[in-house]
Amino acid sequence: MSPAKPPARSSSRAARSGPRRRAKQVGIAGAVIGVAAAGLATAFAVERALVRKSISAPGDPHADEVFGDQPYDEQLTVTAADGTDLHVEIVEPRQPTSKPTVVFVHGFALDMGTFYFQRQALSERGDQRLVFYDQPGHGRSGRLQSGDYDIAALGRSLAAVLDTTVPEGHIILIGHSMGGMTIMAFAEQYPEWFGKRVTGVVLMSTSAGLIDKTKLGVPSLLARASAPFFPLWGGAARIGGTAIDRARIASSDLAWLLTRRYGFGDARPSPSLVTFVEQMNSKTSVETLTKYLHTLYTHNRFPALSALKGVPVLVLVGTKDYLTPVTHSEEILRHLPEAELLKIDNSGHVVMLEKADEVNAALIPFLERIS
């Protein structure tokens, strides 16, 4: 009378099969990882080949351009209200002038080099005072001392730059991408400046409204590919920014290709320009990148645009801008119907670099009309 024995043997077999099943699963997972690793190795090899081929391709119009620091008449550090040190460079006109000072505000993961060709053209004209600065956490500026990287704080940083560098006289503000958002935040906080001190605004490749958190303006294919990682970005700085920075350097070929694909509209942009932009990106720390994400997701400055009414506004955008598409600029025009909108054909997000001649051909007459 031992009816319990067969179940016991069955239980024993189940117990023995458990480790075997787990071993099999681990083996399958290992095989999958191995295949994936082999695929990644092949992909990176292809990327390296593509980058080398692209960089060495003949016909680069900017092959001889020495991108980097440009001449200035004064260099200084402006300390914002929260204690953040901001690197500022000023180009003075060749002769005394009553024209407005032009202040340039760059975008996310870039620096004042963004306006390389505009600085070059306006400096050669020499009839206007120019102010450039690196936003907090970018270029040669310090990190935000407040700890919270938000666009409202960037508006206050711009106010500090203006208070120090342009204590009197008229001002024209030029902002690209997050720089345009910074100008909107400044307008929200200091509307009394507009029409009295600020007499003109140029908004390049920017947005006044909520940016899609899951896509960040990137095409759906890239969004789907990166979707599993978005929840990690907010905490990425906590898991070791130095380690992540090393990984970014190791994957610089991929970064170069992504910069070319999503920063530029032309299928074959200047390799020198792509490298210049990618270098600005790579110099921006992971801490800065991750801490700005939330404020970019929640940016909503449509009400702030009311401060710009009555002030001449020029809006520029590339027709192939994937990060802040044409529809974002058109929405700005819906709130500022008297503004001028110029769409630059076959250009991406860094329109002022990719199509510098066309941007300057619109920018300089605009400055002349309102100066």
Image (cartoon, rainbow, N blue to C red):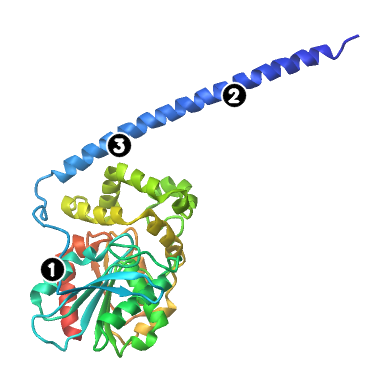
The label on residue 22 is: 2
Rendered position, 265 above or below 53: below
Give the percent coordinates (x, y) of residue 235: 48, 53
Side of 73 where 3 appears, left or right: right
Whether residue 57 is situated above or below residue 106 in the rendered picture: above
Amino acid at the residue labelled 2: Arg
Dot 1 alpha-carbon crowd within 10 angstroms: few under 14, some 14 to 19, many 20 or more: few
Q: The C terminus is located in which quarter?
A: bottom left
Element on which disc 3 rests? helix
Mark 1, residue position = 71
Mark linked to residue 44: 3
Q: Amino acid at mark 3?
A: Phe
Name which residue lies at 30% across and 49% down. 258
Q: Is residue 330 visible?
A: no
Q: Which mark is residue 217?
A: none
Residue 6 percent location from the top left of the image: 80, 12
Say which amino acid is labelled 1. Answer: Pro
Q: Position of residue 74 (x, y in %)?
A: 18, 75
Quadrant for the N terminus in the image: top right
